[in-house]
Image: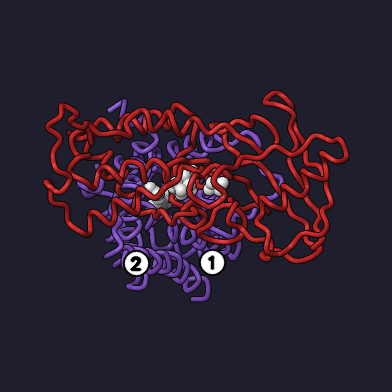
Amino acid sequence: MNLTLLIWRQKDARDKGKMVKYQVSGISEHMSFLEMLDVLNEDLVNKNEEPVAFDHDCREGICGMCSLQINGEAHGPDRRITTCQLHMRTFKDGDTIYIEPFRSKAFPVIKDLIVDRTSFERIQQAGGFISVNTSGNTQDANGILIGKEEADMAMDSATCIGCGACVATCKNSSAMLFVSAKVSQYALLPQGRIEAKDRVKNMIHQMDLEGFGNCTNTGACEVECPKGISLENIARLNREFLKASVK
Amino acid sequence: MSGFSSSSVGRKVIMSLSGLFLITFLLVHLGVNLTLFGGPELFNSASHFMATNLVIQVMQYVLAAGFILHIIMGINLELKNRAARPVKYVKNNPAANSGWASRNMIYTGLLILLFIILHLKDFFVEIKFGEVTSDYDLVTQLFKNPIYVIIYVFAFILLGIHLSHGFQSAFTSIGARKPKYYSCVKNLGIAYSYLIALGFSIIAIYFYFA
Ligand code: HEM
Ligand code: SF4
Ligand code: FES
Protein backbone atom coordinates (compact mmCIF):
# COMPACT_ATOMS: atom_id res chain seq x y z
CA MET A 1 0.00 0.00 0.00
CA ASN A 2 1.05 3.58 -0.68
CA LEU A 3 -0.22 6.20 1.73
CA THR A 4 -0.09 9.93 2.31
CA LEU A 5 0.34 10.83 5.97
CA LEU A 6 -0.35 14.21 7.53
CA ILE A 7 1.42 14.16 10.87
CA TRP A 8 1.59 16.70 13.69
CA ARG A 9 5.22 17.71 14.22
CA GLN A 10 6.23 19.75 17.24
CA LYS A 11 9.82 20.07 18.44
CA ASP A 12 9.05 20.49 22.13
CA ALA A 13 6.37 21.73 24.53
CA ARG A 14 6.99 25.37 23.59
CA ASP A 15 7.06 24.93 19.82
CA LYS A 16 3.86 25.91 18.00
CA GLY A 17 3.83 22.79 15.84
CA LYS A 18 2.28 22.08 12.45
CA MET A 19 1.00 19.31 10.20
CA VAL A 20 3.67 17.87 7.86
CA LYS A 21 3.01 15.69 4.83
CA TYR A 22 4.84 12.38 4.28
CA GLN A 23 4.57 9.59 1.71
CA VAL A 24 5.06 5.95 2.69
CA SER A 25 5.15 3.04 0.28
CA GLY A 26 5.35 -0.72 0.45
CA ILE A 27 3.11 -0.94 3.52
CA SER A 28 1.71 -4.44 4.11
CA GLU A 29 -1.95 -4.63 5.08
CA HIS A 30 -0.93 -7.04 7.87
CA MET A 31 1.15 -4.39 9.60
CA SER A 32 -0.13 -2.63 12.66
CA PHE A 33 -0.49 1.13 12.58
CA LEU A 34 2.61 1.52 14.75
CA GLU A 35 4.64 -0.75 12.44
CA MET A 36 3.62 1.50 9.58
CA LEU A 37 5.01 4.45 11.56
CA ASP A 38 8.20 2.42 12.19
CA VAL A 39 8.61 2.12 8.41
CA LEU A 40 8.20 5.87 8.04
CA ASN A 41 10.72 6.52 10.81
CA GLU A 42 13.28 4.18 9.23
CA ASP A 43 12.89 6.16 6.02
CA LEU A 44 13.35 9.44 7.89
CA VAL A 45 16.43 8.21 9.74
CA ASN A 46 17.97 7.01 6.45
CA LYS A 47 17.37 10.47 5.03
CA ASN A 48 18.99 12.02 8.12
CA GLU A 49 15.71 13.57 9.20
CA GLU A 50 14.24 13.64 12.70
CA PRO A 51 11.95 10.59 13.22
CA VAL A 52 8.37 11.09 14.40
CA ALA A 53 8.10 10.68 18.18
CA PHE A 54 5.13 8.57 19.31
CA ASP A 55 4.25 6.65 22.48
CA HIS A 56 4.13 2.85 22.64
CA ASP A 57 5.15 0.01 24.89
CA CYS A 58 3.42 -3.39 24.95
CA ARG A 59 2.07 -3.28 21.38
CA GLU A 60 -0.64 -5.74 22.36
CA GLY A 61 -3.38 -3.55 23.73
CA ILE A 62 -2.74 -3.87 27.45
CA CYS A 63 -0.51 -1.02 28.57
CA GLY A 64 -2.40 2.00 27.27
CA MET A 65 0.70 3.85 26.11
CA CYS A 66 -0.02 4.13 22.39
CA SER A 67 -2.38 6.99 21.71
CA LEU A 68 -2.95 8.95 18.46
CA GLN A 69 -5.97 10.67 16.99
CA ILE A 70 -6.24 8.99 13.59
CA ASN A 71 -8.51 10.60 10.99
CA GLY A 72 -10.29 12.40 13.80
CA GLU A 73 -10.89 9.34 15.98
CA ALA A 74 -9.01 8.16 19.05
CA HIS A 75 -7.13 4.92 18.19
CA GLY A 76 -8.50 5.20 14.63
CA PRO A 77 -11.72 4.02 13.02
CA ASP A 78 -11.95 0.47 14.45
CA ARG A 79 -13.76 -0.24 17.72
CA ARG A 80 -12.56 -1.82 20.97
CA ILE A 81 -8.88 -1.68 20.01
CA THR A 82 -5.84 0.44 20.72
CA THR A 83 -3.66 1.99 18.01
CA CYS A 84 -1.11 -0.84 18.31
CA GLN A 85 -3.93 -3.29 17.50
CA LEU A 86 -5.13 -1.30 14.48
CA HIS A 87 -4.32 -3.13 11.25
CA MET A 88 -3.37 -1.34 8.06
CA ARG A 89 -6.01 -3.37 6.19
CA THR A 90 -8.50 -0.95 7.74
CA PHE A 91 -7.20 1.57 5.18
CA LYS A 92 -7.11 1.53 1.38
CA ASP A 93 -4.19 2.00 -0.97
CA GLY A 94 -3.83 5.72 -1.75
CA ASP A 95 -5.57 6.89 1.44
CA THR A 96 -4.61 10.10 3.19
CA ILE A 97 -4.36 9.65 6.96
CA TYR A 98 -4.33 12.46 9.53
CA ILE A 99 -2.30 11.65 12.63
CA GLU A 100 -2.50 14.00 15.61
CA PRO A 101 -1.71 13.84 19.32
CA PHE A 102 -4.53 13.42 21.88
CA ARG A 103 -5.70 16.97 22.56
CA SER A 104 -6.55 18.32 25.97
CA LYS A 105 -5.33 21.13 28.21
CA ALA A 106 -4.55 18.40 30.75
CA PHE A 107 -2.51 16.40 28.19
CA PRO A 108 0.17 18.88 27.03
CA VAL A 109 2.25 17.83 24.04
CA ILE A 110 5.83 16.87 24.93
CA LYS A 111 7.02 16.24 21.39
CA ASP A 112 5.30 15.43 18.09
CA LEU A 113 2.64 12.86 18.94
CA ILE A 114 3.66 12.28 22.56
CA VAL A 115 1.52 13.87 25.25
CA ASP A 116 2.01 14.03 29.00
CA ARG A 117 -0.73 11.98 30.67
CA THR A 118 0.56 12.20 34.25
CA SER A 119 -2.61 14.15 35.10
CA PHE A 120 -4.28 10.70 35.14
CA GLU A 121 -1.71 9.49 37.66
CA ARG A 122 -2.35 12.45 39.93
CA ILE A 123 -6.09 11.67 39.82
CA GLN A 124 -5.33 8.07 40.71
CA GLN A 125 -3.07 9.15 43.58
CA ALA A 126 -5.85 11.38 44.91
CA GLY A 127 -8.02 8.38 45.81
CA GLY A 128 -7.54 5.32 43.61
CA PHE A 129 -6.42 2.99 46.39
CA ILE A 130 -7.73 0.96 49.32
CA SER A 131 -6.49 0.30 52.84
CA VAL A 132 -5.01 -3.17 53.19
CA ASN A 133 -3.93 -4.87 56.39
CA THR A 134 -0.25 -5.72 56.09
CA SER A 135 0.32 -6.69 59.71
CA GLY A 136 0.89 -10.34 58.89
CA ASN A 137 -2.69 -11.28 59.81
CA THR A 138 -3.75 -10.80 56.21
CA GLN A 139 -7.25 -12.09 55.66
CA ASP A 140 -7.88 -14.93 53.26
CA ALA A 141 -8.93 -13.51 49.90
CA ASN A 142 -12.05 -15.67 49.91
CA GLY A 143 -13.06 -14.60 53.39
CA ILE A 144 -15.28 -11.81 52.09
CA LEU A 145 -18.09 -13.06 49.88
CA ILE A 146 -18.80 -10.99 46.80
CA GLY A 147 -21.74 -11.48 44.46
CA LYS A 148 -20.84 -12.70 40.98
CA GLU A 149 -22.61 -9.75 39.34
CA GLU A 150 -20.75 -7.13 41.40
CA ALA A 151 -17.46 -8.93 40.89
CA ASP A 152 -18.01 -9.00 37.13
CA MET A 153 -18.92 -5.33 36.99
CA ALA A 154 -15.90 -4.38 39.11
CA MET A 155 -13.67 -6.44 36.82
CA ASP A 156 -15.15 -4.75 33.75
CA SER A 157 -14.41 -1.34 35.22
CA ALA A 158 -10.91 -2.45 36.17
CA THR A 159 -10.06 -3.22 32.55
CA CYS A 160 -9.51 0.51 31.92
CA ILE A 161 -5.91 0.88 30.78
CA GLY A 162 -5.72 4.64 31.35
CA CYS A 163 -5.02 5.37 27.70
CA GLY A 164 -6.89 8.68 27.60
CA ALA A 165 -8.88 7.97 24.45
CA CYS A 166 -12.02 9.03 26.31
CA VAL A 167 -10.52 12.47 26.97
CA ALA A 168 -9.13 12.79 23.44
CA THR A 169 -12.45 11.95 21.86
CA CYS A 170 -14.72 13.95 24.15
CA LYS A 171 -15.74 17.33 22.73
CA ASN A 172 -15.32 18.67 26.29
CA SER A 173 -11.99 16.91 27.00
CA SER A 174 -13.73 15.34 29.97
CA ALA A 175 -11.98 12.60 31.94
CA MET A 176 -15.23 11.30 33.42
CA LEU A 177 -15.08 7.84 31.81
CA PHE A 178 -11.59 7.20 33.14
CA VAL A 179 -12.39 8.53 36.62
CA SER A 180 -15.70 6.66 36.71
CA ALA A 181 -13.97 3.38 35.84
CA LYS A 182 -11.40 3.91 38.57
CA VAL A 183 -14.05 4.86 41.14
CA SER A 184 -16.33 2.00 40.09
CA GLN A 185 -13.77 -0.75 40.40
CA TYR A 186 -13.55 0.04 44.13
CA ALA A 187 -17.09 1.25 44.78
CA LEU A 188 -18.52 -2.11 43.70
CA LEU A 189 -16.43 -4.13 46.15
CA PRO A 190 -16.67 -4.21 49.96
CA GLN A 191 -12.95 -3.46 50.31
CA GLY A 192 -13.50 -0.20 48.49
CA ARG A 193 -16.38 1.05 50.61
CA ILE A 194 -14.22 2.20 53.51
CA GLU A 195 -12.75 5.22 51.71
CA ALA A 196 -15.62 5.52 49.22
CA LYS A 197 -16.73 9.03 50.19
CA ASP A 198 -13.32 10.63 50.27
CA ARG A 199 -12.23 8.78 47.18
CA VAL A 200 -14.96 10.05 44.88
CA LYS A 201 -14.69 13.62 46.15
CA ASN A 202 -10.90 13.75 45.98
CA MET A 203 -10.64 12.16 42.56
CA ILE A 204 -13.26 14.49 41.07
CA HIS A 205 -11.57 17.46 42.74
CA GLN A 206 -8.21 16.47 41.22
CA MET A 207 -9.87 15.90 37.82
CA ASP A 208 -11.22 19.47 37.94
CA LEU A 209 -7.87 20.89 39.06
CA GLU A 210 -6.09 19.26 36.12
CA GLY A 211 -8.27 21.23 33.69
CA PHE A 212 -10.40 18.47 32.18
CA GLY A 213 -13.82 19.60 30.93
CA ASN A 214 -17.32 18.77 32.14
CA CYS A 215 -19.19 15.68 30.95
CA THR A 216 -22.31 16.35 28.89
CA ASN A 217 -23.13 12.69 28.30
CA THR A 218 -22.49 12.75 24.56
CA GLY A 219 -21.38 9.11 24.84
CA ALA A 220 -18.41 9.57 22.46
CA CYS A 221 -16.05 8.13 25.10
CA GLU A 222 -17.75 4.76 25.43
CA VAL A 223 -17.75 4.37 21.63
CA GLU A 224 -14.02 5.06 21.33
CA CYS A 225 -12.85 3.36 24.55
CA PRO A 226 -10.69 0.37 23.59
CA LYS A 227 -11.93 -1.55 26.64
CA GLY A 228 -15.64 -0.86 26.27
CA ILE A 229 -15.99 1.02 29.57
CA SER A 230 -19.64 2.10 29.54
CA LEU A 231 -21.55 5.23 30.58
CA GLU A 232 -23.10 3.19 33.40
CA ASN A 233 -19.80 3.88 35.14
CA ILE A 234 -20.31 7.63 34.80
CA ALA A 235 -23.80 7.30 36.27
CA ARG A 236 -22.28 5.31 39.16
CA LEU A 237 -19.65 8.03 39.66
CA ASN A 238 -22.43 10.63 39.83
CA ARG A 239 -24.33 8.49 42.36
CA GLU A 240 -21.23 8.03 44.47
CA PHE A 241 -20.60 11.77 44.38
CA LEU A 242 -24.17 12.58 45.41
CA LYS A 243 -24.04 10.03 48.23
CA ALA A 244 -20.76 11.53 49.45
CA SER A 245 -22.14 15.08 49.23
CA VAL A 246 -25.34 14.57 51.22
CA LYS A 247 -23.48 12.50 53.86
CA MET B 1 -22.93 23.64 49.10
CA SER B 2 -20.29 25.96 47.62
CA GLY B 3 -17.99 22.95 47.30
CA PHE B 4 -20.81 21.13 45.58
CA SER B 5 -21.50 23.75 42.90
CA SER B 6 -17.82 24.40 42.29
CA SER B 7 -17.36 20.74 41.34
CA SER B 8 -17.90 19.69 37.74
CA VAL B 9 -20.24 16.89 38.79
CA GLY B 10 -22.13 19.17 41.17
CA ARG B 11 -22.71 21.69 38.39
CA LYS B 12 -24.03 18.92 36.17
CA VAL B 13 -26.47 17.90 38.90
CA ILE B 14 -27.76 21.48 39.04
CA MET B 15 -28.01 21.49 35.23
CA SER B 16 -29.96 18.26 35.36
CA LEU B 17 -32.38 19.24 38.15
CA SER B 18 -33.12 22.62 36.55
CA GLY B 19 -33.63 20.85 33.22
CA LEU B 20 -36.00 18.29 34.73
CA PHE B 21 -37.91 21.12 36.39
CA LEU B 22 -38.25 22.89 33.02
CA ILE B 23 -39.42 19.60 31.49
CA THR B 24 -42.24 19.45 34.05
CA PHE B 25 -43.12 23.08 33.44
CA LEU B 26 -43.41 22.48 29.68
CA LEU B 27 -46.04 19.79 30.30
CA VAL B 28 -48.16 22.21 32.34
CA HIS B 29 -47.71 24.91 29.71
CA LEU B 30 -48.75 22.54 26.93
CA GLY B 31 -51.81 21.55 28.95
CA VAL B 32 -52.89 25.20 29.24
CA ASN B 33 -52.28 25.82 25.53
CA LEU B 34 -54.42 22.83 24.58
CA THR B 35 -57.41 24.54 26.16
CA LEU B 36 -57.24 26.94 23.16
CA PHE B 37 -59.13 24.22 21.29
CA GLY B 38 -61.93 24.59 23.85
CA GLY B 39 -62.67 28.13 22.70
CA PRO B 40 -62.18 31.61 24.19
CA GLU B 41 -64.04 30.98 27.43
CA LEU B 42 -62.11 27.89 28.47
CA PHE B 43 -58.73 29.33 27.51
CA ASN B 44 -59.36 32.68 29.16
CA SER B 45 -60.38 31.03 32.40
CA ALA B 46 -57.34 28.73 32.28
CA SER B 47 -55.15 31.75 31.59
CA HIS B 48 -56.88 33.70 34.36
CA PHE B 49 -56.30 30.82 36.77
CA MET B 50 -52.59 30.75 35.88
CA ALA B 51 -52.35 34.51 36.41
CA THR B 52 -54.10 34.61 39.80
CA ASN B 53 -53.61 31.29 41.60
CA LEU B 54 -51.28 31.77 44.53
CA VAL B 55 -49.32 28.54 44.05
CA ILE B 56 -48.79 29.34 40.37
CA GLN B 57 -47.70 32.87 41.28
CA VAL B 58 -45.05 31.55 43.63
CA MET B 59 -44.01 28.91 41.09
CA GLN B 60 -43.47 31.68 38.55
CA TYR B 61 -40.48 32.92 40.54
CA VAL B 62 -39.17 29.40 40.99
CA LEU B 63 -39.51 28.93 37.24
CA ALA B 64 -37.63 32.15 36.50
CA ALA B 65 -34.90 31.05 38.90
CA GLY B 66 -34.81 27.61 37.25
CA PHE B 67 -34.35 29.16 33.81
CA ILE B 68 -31.67 31.55 34.99
CA LEU B 69 -29.80 28.79 36.80
CA HIS B 70 -30.00 26.49 33.77
CA ILE B 71 -28.84 29.19 31.37
CA ILE B 72 -25.98 30.51 33.53
CA MET B 73 -24.77 26.98 34.31
CA GLY B 74 -25.10 26.00 30.64
CA ILE B 75 -23.02 28.93 29.41
CA ASN B 76 -20.50 28.41 32.21
CA LEU B 77 -20.21 24.71 31.30
CA GLU B 78 -19.65 25.51 27.65
CA LEU B 79 -16.93 28.10 28.35
CA LYS B 80 -15.09 25.74 30.69
CA ASN B 81 -15.33 22.93 28.15
CA ARG B 82 -13.92 25.10 25.37
CA ALA B 83 -11.00 26.09 27.59
CA ALA B 84 -10.27 22.41 28.22
CA ARG B 85 -9.03 21.97 24.63
CA PRO B 86 -6.94 25.01 23.69
CA VAL B 87 -5.53 23.41 20.51
CA LYS B 88 -8.23 21.94 18.28
CA TYR B 89 -7.89 18.92 16.03
CA VAL B 90 -7.03 19.63 12.40
CA LYS B 91 -9.19 16.66 11.40
CA ASN B 92 -12.08 15.67 13.62
CA ASN B 93 -14.81 13.11 13.07
CA PRO B 94 -17.27 13.57 15.94
CA ALA B 95 -20.20 12.13 13.97
CA ALA B 96 -18.49 8.73 14.22
CA ASN B 97 -19.15 8.51 17.94
CA SER B 98 -21.86 10.93 19.05
CA GLY B 99 -25.18 12.44 18.03
CA TRP B 100 -25.65 15.93 16.62
CA ALA B 101 -28.10 16.97 19.34
CA SER B 102 -25.65 16.05 22.11
CA ARG B 103 -22.85 18.08 20.54
CA ASN B 104 -24.90 21.22 19.94
CA MET B 105 -26.80 21.70 23.20
CA ILE B 106 -25.37 25.19 23.66
CA TYR B 107 -26.58 26.33 20.21
CA THR B 108 -30.05 24.83 20.47
CA GLY B 109 -30.16 26.24 24.02
CA LEU B 110 -29.14 29.78 23.02
CA LEU B 111 -31.63 29.87 20.14
CA ILE B 112 -34.35 28.72 22.54
CA LEU B 113 -33.28 31.56 24.83
CA LEU B 114 -33.78 34.09 21.99
CA PHE B 115 -37.22 32.67 21.41
CA ILE B 116 -38.05 32.84 25.12
CA ILE B 117 -37.19 36.55 25.12
CA LEU B 118 -39.45 37.16 22.11
CA HIS B 119 -42.14 35.01 23.67
CA LEU B 120 -42.06 36.90 26.96
CA LYS B 121 -42.31 40.21 25.15
CA ASP B 122 -45.29 39.11 23.04
CA PHE B 123 -47.32 37.21 25.59
CA PHE B 124 -46.18 37.56 29.16
CA VAL B 125 -45.53 41.31 29.14
CA GLU B 126 -48.70 42.00 27.14
CA ILE B 127 -50.93 39.93 29.40
CA LYS B 128 -49.36 41.12 32.62
CA PHE B 129 -48.85 44.81 31.87
CA GLY B 130 -50.69 45.52 28.60
CA GLU B 131 -54.32 46.37 27.90
CA VAL B 132 -55.44 42.87 26.98
CA THR B 133 -59.14 42.11 27.30
CA SER B 134 -59.04 38.56 25.97
CA ASP B 135 -55.92 36.44 26.19
CA TYR B 136 -57.53 34.13 23.66
CA ASP B 137 -57.76 36.92 21.08
CA LEU B 138 -54.18 37.98 21.74
CA VAL B 139 -52.86 34.47 21.17
CA THR B 140 -54.98 33.58 18.14
CA GLN B 141 -54.22 36.98 16.55
CA LEU B 142 -50.47 36.39 16.87
CA PHE B 143 -50.85 32.98 15.29
CA LYS B 144 -52.32 34.71 12.21
CA ASN B 145 -48.88 36.18 11.53
CA PRO B 146 -47.06 33.70 9.25
CA ILE B 147 -43.59 34.92 10.27
CA TYR B 148 -44.47 34.47 13.91
CA VAL B 149 -45.77 30.94 13.29
CA ILE B 150 -42.61 29.99 11.39
CA ILE B 151 -40.38 31.28 14.21
CA TYR B 152 -42.60 29.56 16.75
CA VAL B 153 -42.51 26.16 15.03
CA PHE B 154 -38.76 26.45 14.40
CA ALA B 155 -38.17 27.20 18.10
CA PHE B 156 -40.12 24.13 19.17
CA ILE B 157 -38.27 21.88 16.74
CA LEU B 158 -35.04 23.16 18.34
CA LEU B 159 -36.47 22.51 21.78
CA GLY B 160 -37.40 18.97 20.68
CA ILE B 161 -33.80 18.42 19.55
CA HIS B 162 -32.47 19.89 22.83
CA LEU B 163 -34.68 17.51 24.77
CA SER B 164 -33.97 14.44 22.64
CA HIS B 165 -30.52 14.50 24.22
CA GLY B 166 -31.30 16.47 27.38
CA PHE B 167 -34.03 14.23 28.78
CA GLN B 168 -31.96 11.05 29.11
CA SER B 169 -28.80 13.05 29.84
CA ALA B 170 -30.47 14.60 32.88
CA PHE B 171 -31.06 11.12 34.32
CA THR B 172 -27.45 10.08 33.77
CA SER B 173 -26.23 13.30 35.41
CA ILE B 174 -27.97 12.44 38.68
CA GLY B 175 -26.87 8.82 38.47
CA ALA B 176 -30.26 7.38 37.50
CA ARG B 177 -29.02 5.09 34.78
CA LYS B 178 -28.83 1.31 34.82
CA PRO B 179 -28.90 -1.14 31.91
CA LYS B 180 -32.25 -2.45 33.18
CA TYR B 181 -34.19 0.73 32.52
CA TYR B 182 -31.93 2.99 30.44
CA SER B 183 -33.57 2.21 27.09
CA CYS B 184 -36.94 2.91 28.70
CA VAL B 185 -35.76 6.38 29.84
CA LYS B 186 -34.28 7.05 26.44
CA ASN B 187 -37.48 6.14 24.58
CA LEU B 188 -39.56 8.14 27.02
CA GLY B 189 -37.30 11.12 26.29
CA ILE B 190 -37.78 10.73 22.54
CA ALA B 191 -41.55 10.43 22.97
CA TYR B 192 -41.56 13.49 25.24
CA SER B 193 -39.49 15.50 22.73
CA TYR B 194 -41.96 14.70 19.94
CA LEU B 195 -44.90 15.53 22.20
CA ILE B 196 -43.47 18.98 23.00
CA ALA B 197 -42.27 19.82 19.49
CA LEU B 198 -45.46 18.62 17.76
CA GLY B 199 -47.89 19.63 20.51
CA PHE B 200 -46.96 23.30 20.58
CA SER B 201 -46.40 23.52 16.80
CA ILE B 202 -49.73 21.96 15.85
CA ILE B 203 -51.60 24.48 18.00
CA ALA B 204 -49.88 27.40 16.24
CA ILE B 205 -50.40 25.92 12.78
CA TYR B 206 -54.03 25.08 13.49
CA PHE B 207 -54.85 28.64 14.53
CA TYR B 208 -52.97 30.06 11.56
CA PHE B 209 -55.35 28.22 9.24
CA ALA B 210 -58.44 28.39 11.47
C1 HEM C 1 -37.60 25.10 28.23
C2 HEM C 1 -36.34 25.19 27.96
C3 HEM C 1 -35.28 24.16 28.28
C4 HEM C 1 -35.38 22.85 28.72
C5 HEM C 1 -36.63 22.07 29.04
C6 HEM C 1 -34.02 22.33 28.83
C7 HEM C 1 -33.70 21.07 29.25
C8 HEM C 1 -32.41 20.58 29.38
C9 HEM C 1 -32.05 19.30 29.91
C10 HEM C 1 -33.02 18.27 30.46
C11 HEM C 1 -30.69 19.18 29.85
C12 HEM C 1 -29.85 18.00 30.28
C13 HEM C 1 -29.23 18.23 31.62
C14 HEM C 1 -28.18 17.23 31.94
O1 HEM C 1 -27.64 16.55 31.07
O2 HEM C 1 -27.85 17.08 33.12
C15 HEM C 1 -30.20 20.39 29.28
C16 HEM C 1 -28.87 20.66 29.06
C17 HEM C 1 -28.38 21.85 28.58
N1 HEM C 1 -29.11 22.97 28.26
FE1 HEM C 1 -31.10 23.14 28.37
N2 HEM C 1 -33.13 23.31 28.47
C18 HEM C 1 -33.86 24.43 28.14
C19 HEM C 1 -33.37 25.67 27.77
C20 HEM C 1 -32.03 25.97 27.64
C21 HEM C 1 -31.51 27.28 27.36
C22 HEM C 1 -32.34 28.56 27.20
C23 HEM C 1 -30.16 27.16 27.28
C24 HEM C 1 -29.24 28.34 26.98
C25 HEM C 1 -28.03 28.45 27.31
C26 HEM C 1 -29.82 25.76 27.51
C27 HEM C 1 -28.55 25.22 27.47
C28 HEM C 1 -28.23 23.95 27.84
C29 HEM C 1 -26.88 23.43 27.87
C30 HEM C 1 -25.61 24.16 27.48
C31 HEM C 1 -26.97 22.12 28.35
C32 HEM C 1 -25.77 21.24 28.65
C33 HEM C 1 -25.61 20.11 27.80
C34 HEM C 1 -25.63 18.85 28.60
O3 HEM C 1 -25.22 18.84 29.77
O4 HEM C 1 -26.04 17.85 28.06
N3 HEM C 1 -30.99 25.06 27.73
N4 HEM C 1 -31.25 21.24 28.99
S1 SF4 D 1 -11.98 4.63 30.11
FE1 SF4 D 1 -11.38 3.60 28.20
S2 SF4 D 1 -10.70 5.29 26.89
FE2 SF4 D 1 -10.71 6.10 28.97
S3 SF4 D 1 -8.64 5.78 29.76
FE3 SF4 D 1 -9.84 3.95 30.36
S4 SF4 D 1 -9.51 2.49 28.69
FE4 SF4 D 1 -8.84 4.48 27.89
S1 FES E 1 1.32 -0.05 23.00
FE1 FES E 1 0.45 -0.90 24.84
S2 FES E 1 -1.68 -0.64 24.42
FE2 FES E 1 -0.80 -0.01 22.55
| Residue A206 at least partly seen | yes
- Counting from the top left corner in percent of width and height, residue B204 is at 48, 67
| Image quarter of residue A244 | top left
| Residue B117 at least partly seen | no
> Can you tell which chain is drawn red?
A
Outermost residue, bottom direction?
A: B210
| Image quarter of residue B166 | bottom left
- Of residues B206 and A41, which is closer to you in this image? A41
Q: Residue at x 44, y 26 (%)?
A: A209
Question: Label 1: chain?
Answer: B
Residue type pointed to by label 2: Ser
Between label 2 and label 1, give the one nearer the viewer. 2
Residue type pointed to by label 1: Lys
Query: In the rendered image, which quarter contains the C terminus of chain A?
Result: top left
- Counting from the top left corner in percent of width and height, residue A177 is at 42, 46
| Residue ID for mark 2 | B183
- Counting from the top left corner in percent of width and height, residue B79 is at 53, 35
Question: Label 2: chain?
Answer: B
Q: Which mark is residue B144?
A: 1
Question: How busy is the neighbourhood of tag 1: few (under 14 within 10 Å), some, or many (20 plus)?
Answer: some
| Image quarter of residue A2 | bottom right
Element assignment for label 1: loop
Task: Please indicate whether residue A58 sits to the left or right of residue A109 in the image.
Answer: left
Tell me which label, 2 or 1, sits earlier in the chain: 1
- Of residues B115 and A201, which is closer to you in this image? A201
> Can you tell which chain is drawn purple?
B
Element assignment for label 2: helix
Tell me: residue A205, above or below residue A237: above
Task: Please indicate whether residue A184 sits to the left or right of residue B155 in the image.
Answer: left
Outermost residue, front direction?
A: A136
